[in-house]
Image: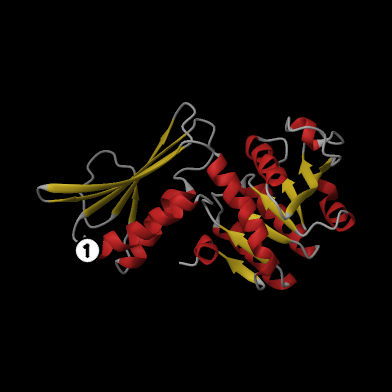
Amino acid sequence: MINAGVTGASGRMGKLIIENIIKMEGIQLSSAFDLMNIGKDVGEVAQVGKLNVSISDVADMGTVLKESKTDVVIDFTIAPATAANAPVVAGAGVDLIIGTTGFSEEQRATIEDAISRNGTSAVISPNYSVGVNVFFKILQETAKYLSEYDIEIIEAHHNQKKDAPSGTAMKAAEVISETLGGKDFVYGREGLAPRDKEIGIHAVRGGDIVGDHTVLFAGDGERIEIKHQAHSRNAFASGAVKAAIWIKNAGPGIHTMDDILGF
């Protein structure tokens, strides 16, 4: 049985991840962390029934992880929090599933260094949806045949999302760029903005949109649009919990959804 911890346990994604943990076989909730609701039963906070796991202060994370014998922590919080959490988690010898996006280069380096120094394992992905990761593979193949087409990426998310463009949009751009040997990225446009061979990336924020990503390949007289739409955050949460089960048999180091899906 895998013992899993969840950071941001009182938040929307934290609650959904907890709901998925208690539904899946082979994994159980052993610890939960947040800055609020400390001392409360996390199951009652998540409205899934009492689980006899109290929400702990993130300041006590290292001690709680060891005492609860947690094997893996799932972190879908915000970039500064994950960058602070990762060294503590890795230092306790615990593996990581990271779904946070919007890292600076320094934050990403801090996380990777902590995992490397402590010989732990991690999956870091901007999106744990199986469909999105198939979407990336489709983009990779399409770009091979449409290298001369103009390429634009449009993403839309709810009005509470803090980072823009989304990590998924950036991953899509990186996949296409690598396939085509390197492309510049342009974020939105205004004023005089003649188009070259860059990849344009545009962010929309509004309402309760879970996550829409459209990649436009536009040529002379035709265009192809490849789209992924998330109807529920459960696609992300369930994928992250499956990654937490998968990582038990993974070697030390940083892994991706490509590894999990066998791409």
Q: Is residue 38 visible?
A: yes
Q: Is residue 251 above or below residue 7?
A: below
Determine the residue positioned at 51% across, 62% down.
261
The residue located at (22%, 63%) in the rendering is: 145
The extreme front residue here reads: 25
Viewer-nearest residue: 27 or 107: 27
Name the residue carrying label 1. 145
Q: Is residue 36 visible?
A: no
- Most distant residue in the right direction: 67
Residue 143, position in %: x, y? 27, 61
Looking at the image, residue 127 lies above or below residue 263: above
Q: What amino acid is at disc 1? A: Tyr
- For this view, does 262 lie left or right of residue 55? left
Q: Residue 85, relative to residue 36: is it above or below?
A: below
Q: Quadrant of residue 95?
A: bottom right
Please rate how many residues cluster around mark 1, counting C-alpha atoms within 10 Å: few if below 14, some from 14 to 19, many from 20: few
Q: Position of residue 155 (x, y in %)?
A: 39, 41
